[in-house]
Image (cartoon, grey):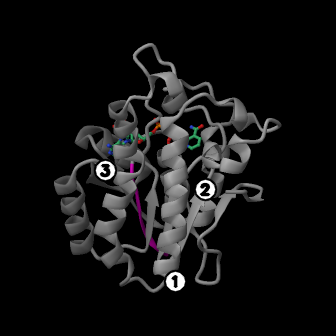
Amino acid sequence: MTTTLITGANKGLGFETARRLVAAGHTVYVGSRDAERGRRAAERLGARTVLLDVTDDASVAAAARTVAADGGLDVLINNAGVEGRTEDAGVIGAADATADAVRRVFETNVFGVVRVSHAFLPLLQRSAAPVVVNVSSGLASLSHASDPDSPAYGYPGVAYPASKAAVNMLTVQYAKAFPNIRINAVEPGYTATDLNGRTGTQTVEEGAEIIVRMAQVGPDGPTGGYFDVSGPLPW
Ligand SMILES: NC(=O)c1ccc[n+]([C@@H]2O[C@H](COP(=O)([O-])OP(=O)(O)OC[C@H]3O[C@@H](n4cnc5c(N)ncnc54)[C@H](OP(=O)(O)O)[C@@H]3O)[C@@H](O)[C@H]2O)c1
């Protein structure tokens, strides 16, 4: 059984992933940027909790120290993410995509993944079977975004798909750099969570499936790939 850290696990897909991994017998840290939300989620799940804001160097470093002191880490799930909607809840389209607006989304979705990965890689390298799951999105696929027959084609946002495309490239580059770690990007599918005002058409149980599966791949499993529940996706 492994020890797993899930960022942004106090609700949504991260919470459901934690629930499934706890049920499978794993030790799970619920990462939460708010101590009380993390404590409540962990209590419901029978999990541990660690305070972790992916946009904050000191918070991430402290979380890494805590997890190291408690015995280390086998699986890191970079799940925390934001869509970066405007005040009237619209997605940030090309006309509104200021550098500040895009930077805010990248700060969590991209630099957050880099910050957390950098802090936890030394712990993962001490594991016998280390795994990283980067929660990407189907909207990250350049192939789908440029294919008029794909549902992703019609998504007007700029910041969110660009940030997740960057996560996909991080996945490829980290996977090559750390061949002993299984590192994959996953697309949960359009899932009803707070991220999209609960407009998603899947349940969190359905959405978490590929995250849970990739969190449990063995040393012979894939690395450097991009998957949804049905298999590999085009970049
Ligand atoms: N829902 C979908 O249809 C869908 C589809 C494809 C990919 N995804 C991806 O799935 C992941 C989970 O999203 P979700 O749908 O479950 O959304 P959600 O319910 O809104 O959950 C997002 C989680 O990320 C946390 N978070 C946000 N900023 C953070 C920060 N700076 N530091 C730490 N945690 C932070 C949130 O914490 P707070 O409670 O403190 O805000 C929350 O726990 C995201 O990466 C998202 O892009 C979702």
Instruction: Provide the residue designation for mark 1.
Output: 179
Q: Is residue 88 above or below residue 39?
A: above
Q: CA distance from mark 1 to mark 3?
A: 25 Å
Q: Is residue 50 left or right of residue 105?
A: left
Query: Residue 13: percent from the left, percent from the top?
Result: 53, 44
Query: Residue 69: percent from the left, percent from the top?
Result: 21, 73
Q: Quadrant of residue 11?
A: top left
Mark 1 or mark 3: whose residue is earlier in sequence:
3
- x 51%, y 19%: residue: 90
Q: CA distance from mark 2 to mark 1?
A: 18 Å
Instruction: Provide the residue designation for mark 2.
Output: 186
Mark 3 or mark 2: whose residue is earlier in sequence:
3
Q: CA distance from mark 3 to mark 2?
A: 19 Å
Query: Residue 98: percent from the left, percent from the top?
Result: 38, 29
Number of marks in the rendered image: 3
Confirm whether residue 213 shows in the render. yes
Determine whether the residue tagged by mark 2 lies in a helix, strand or loop: strand
Q: Amino acid at mark 1?
A: Pro
